[in-house]
């Protein structure tokens, strides 16, 4: 779990304790299996719970709780067809805004770096990114979504390929803070400056980003307020007074020095052959 999510869970535990509830954690890689139903049933039968909080679980786990009409609340985004109450960042709105911001700074060659994992929040991010491109008036856009395996080596290979292409991006949106750190340090390694050569926005936040130079343009959430609202709705779900609906915590865009206005040279010049890249295998 990321540092913000650890903070969120800790605050949630504190709020629930005040209302007479304990918060227990059940963490296991088997929840991510292709067929996790047997393991989910085992956990469910061994544990008495007033409410189950499903932390960014895959479709199969969400379906299991829905089919049994179990009292459950999704901390994250529900998959299509899931009718359970949920709370999450508005990933679609964040990515839509990020694309609009890059376009407003003159960028016409973009890339969205995201992991291959097909969790619901990532699908929402993709939708927001694509929707923003469809509504853009620019006709000269090059803006692929590029997928990586989450490893340092995988992100390096992806970036090497992007900046060897005929249309290397001048603006990059990165989905996760830890992947942003790999991206920024690798771009520096291959001789690209931020933001003079490449502007970067992160679609999420982490405490460590406050210590990165140049400062990172990113989307910030008040996790204390998040935990307070989350605890309120979890208690409503536990007592049967919460109808299935999506609830969102709105993030605030924090402009950093990783974002700059693009130059005509950046948009027109082919940097693909001029960057000294190292292939990592």
Image (tube, grey):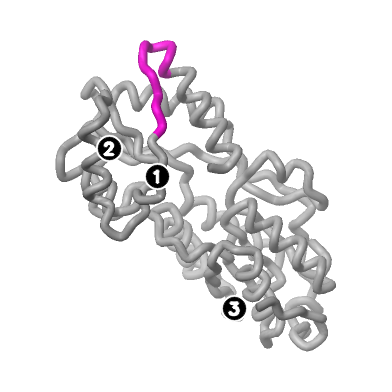
Where 255 sits versus 99, above or below? above
Q: How far apart are marks 2 and 3 (CA)?
A: 47 Å
Dot 3: element: loop
Residue under label 2: 43
Dot 1: element: loop
Q: 165 or 195, which is in the foreground?
A: 165
Q: Distance between the residues labelled 1 and 3?
A: 40 Å
Q: In which quarter of the image is residue 7?
A: top right
Marks 2 and 1 in Cβ contact (< 8 Å): yes
Residue under label 1: 28
Marks 1 and 3 in Cβ contact (< 8 Å): no
In percent of width and height, residue 273 lies at: 78, 88
Disc on res. 142: 3
Residue 20 in magenta? yes
- Left or right: 230 as drawn, with respect to 164: left
- Left or right: 188 as drawn, with respect to 206: right
First along the sequence among labels 2 and 1 = 1
Q: 175 or 110, which is in the foreground?
A: 175
Q: 204 or 186, which is in the foreground?
A: 186
């Amino acid at each position: 779990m990321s540092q913000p999510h650890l903070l969120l869970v800790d605050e949630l535990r504190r709020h629930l304790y005040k209302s007479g509830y304990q918060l227990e954690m059940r963490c296991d890689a088997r929840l991510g299996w292709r067929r996790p139903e047997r393991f989910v049933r085992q956990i469910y039968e061994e544990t008495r719970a007033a409410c189950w909080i499903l932390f960014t679980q895959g479709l199969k786990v969400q379906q299991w709780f829905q089919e049994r009409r179990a009292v459950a609340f999704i901390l994250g985004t529900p998959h299509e067809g899931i009718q359970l109450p949920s709370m999450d960042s508005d990933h679609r709105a964040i990515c839509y805004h990020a694309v609009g911001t890059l376009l407003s700074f003159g960028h016409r060659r973009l890339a969205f770096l995201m992991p291959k994992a097909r969790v619901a929040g990532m699908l929402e991010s993709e939708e927001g990114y694509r929707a923003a491109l469809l509504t853009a008036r620019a006709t000269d856009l090059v803006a692929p979504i590029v997928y990586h395996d989450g490893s340092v080596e995988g992100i390096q290979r992806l970036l090497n390929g992007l900046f060897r292409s005929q249309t290397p991006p001048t603006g990059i949106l990165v989905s996760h803070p830890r992947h942003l750190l790999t991206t920024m340090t690798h771009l520096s390694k291959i001789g690209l400056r931020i933001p003079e050569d490449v502007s970067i926005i992160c679609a999420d936040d982490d405490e460590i980003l406050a210590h990165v130079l140049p400062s990172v343009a990113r989307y910030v959430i008040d996790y204390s307020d998040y935990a307070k609202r989350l605890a309120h709705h979890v208690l409503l779900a536990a007592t049967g007074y919460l109808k299935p609906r999506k609830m969102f915590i709105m993030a605030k865009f924090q402009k950093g020095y990783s974002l700059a206005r693009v130059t005509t040279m950046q948009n027109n010049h082919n940097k693909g052959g001029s960057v000294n890249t190292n292939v990592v295998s």
